[in-house]
Amino acid sequence: MQPIPSHVRDHAGLILADTLGAIVAGHRETEVSAMVARHATGGVPLLGTAAAAPPPMAAFLTGLAGTATELDEGNYPAGGHPAIHAIAPALAEAAVRNCGGEALLTACIAGYEAGSRVGHAMRLRPAAHPHGTWGVIGAAAAVASLRGHDAARTQGALDLAASLGLATSATASLRGGSVRNVYAGAAAQNGLLAVDLAEAGVTGEPLGIPVVFGTVIGNAWDQMAYEASAGRWFILESFLKLHSCCRETQGALEAIERLLTEAPIAPEAVTVIEVETFGSASLLSERAAVAPIAGRFSIPFTVATRIVSGGAWIEAFSPAAIADPATRALAAKVTVREDPALTARQPAERVCRVVLRLADGTTRRREVIGTPGDPGRPHPEAALRDKFRRCVEPGLGARWRELWEMARHPDRLSSAAALFQAFRP
């Protein structure tokens, strides 16, 4: 990999801190806790817990935790969430090797870029979810970086990893299947295993990346785009979230936030909320979410829970919140449809229009382009620091300030062991 400029490393530290916060928050989820209890047989420490697991399982559990609350970062040009796929196995490998923080951050960047390049060059099949697909490439690249592999050995591991991605379903989350949260963890685990397998002499398909991602998991591959992206720092184009829900719900959510800033919205006064947006966001139209993950991938529920509960943080998508009668009644009044003209404005603009109709005959409207946290509208670092606090403080208390500084500036750490020790409850 080319030398990494200081501003790229600095931004990567922000991504790492944000992702570690999401991981710690995810470990408090019931399903994650149950899996940790089952597989905590010793080995690699799991951040935010007192447990440890063998390296491949640690990578899996960390990836699972990191996506469980839908707080992890993403990347539009890559078409997915590169950070968690790279960071989860990098943490497992760093713990085994007790490398310095500089090496850990370098590996996270290497994995982020390798996975993003593939995601950018491929066209994912419409029915597939991006998690667990090209992310396995980023996972393998991160591990290979920590093991000091040269370009040729790394490419061999990536060719092998290409055949270890998942056949994911984009509709699983919409229908309440929390199996979607497993995808990134499985790819993290498989990326680490790919490097192990390559070192053991197992070989992948030569030039397997364009084959798998262009014709098997995907239906097109742009080799020119792949080659041209070699000098591009995708990590600088990341988006970061302050809400515990899918990015594509957050255009409507911001429109509601702006309307609430102008004047309160009483749930019982709403007759209908009309949402017009681009194609992929319009698919998140389920009014009767059946599970927390379905609520996180539903524009009607996200908008309704914000108005009723006052937020869109983790608790706004709990099982109790999903079942709340007032929230469900309001979600049933939200309609979502695609406006082809807005779809045509992508990728340059991600537009959402909201019309709020009230029982007194009042109509309120708001259009937003993009959402806070997008590359062109970054969150202030203070807001991300507060997000980290909300993720970490419930389990680790006032130490969250120290943990933020360690995660935000990993280059200053002489040993990864210090990071793992600090994040123990």
Image (cartoon, rainbow, N blue to C red):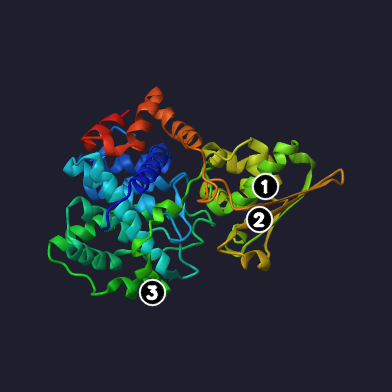
Name the residue nearer the viewer: 58 or 403.
403
What is the CA distance from the residue labelled 1 to the residue labelled 3? 38 Å
| Image quadrant where one finds the N terminus | bottom left
What is the CA distance from the residue labelled 2 to the residue labelled 3? 32 Å
- Residue 409 coordinates in the image, percent (x, y): 33, 36
When asked about the image quadrant of residue 305, the answer is: top right
- Of mark 2 and mark 3, the one earlier in the sequence is 3
| Image quadrant where one finds the C terminus | top left
* Mark 2 touches mark 3? (CB < 8 Å): no
Q: Residue at x 37, y 68 (%)?
A: 228
When asked about the image quadrant of residue 53, the answer is: top left
**Residue 325 appearing in the image:** no
- Residue 377 coordinates in the image, percent (x, y): 55, 47
Badge 2 is on which residue?
352
- Of mark 1 and mark 3, the one earlier in the sequence is 3
What is the CA distance from the residue labelled 2 to the residue labelled 1? 8 Å
Q: Nearer the viewer, mark 2 or mark 3?
A: 3
Q: Residue at x 25, y 42 (%)?
A: 102
Mark 3 belongs to which amino acid? Answer: Met
Mark 2 belongs to which amino acid? Answer: Cys
Badge 1 is on which residue?
255
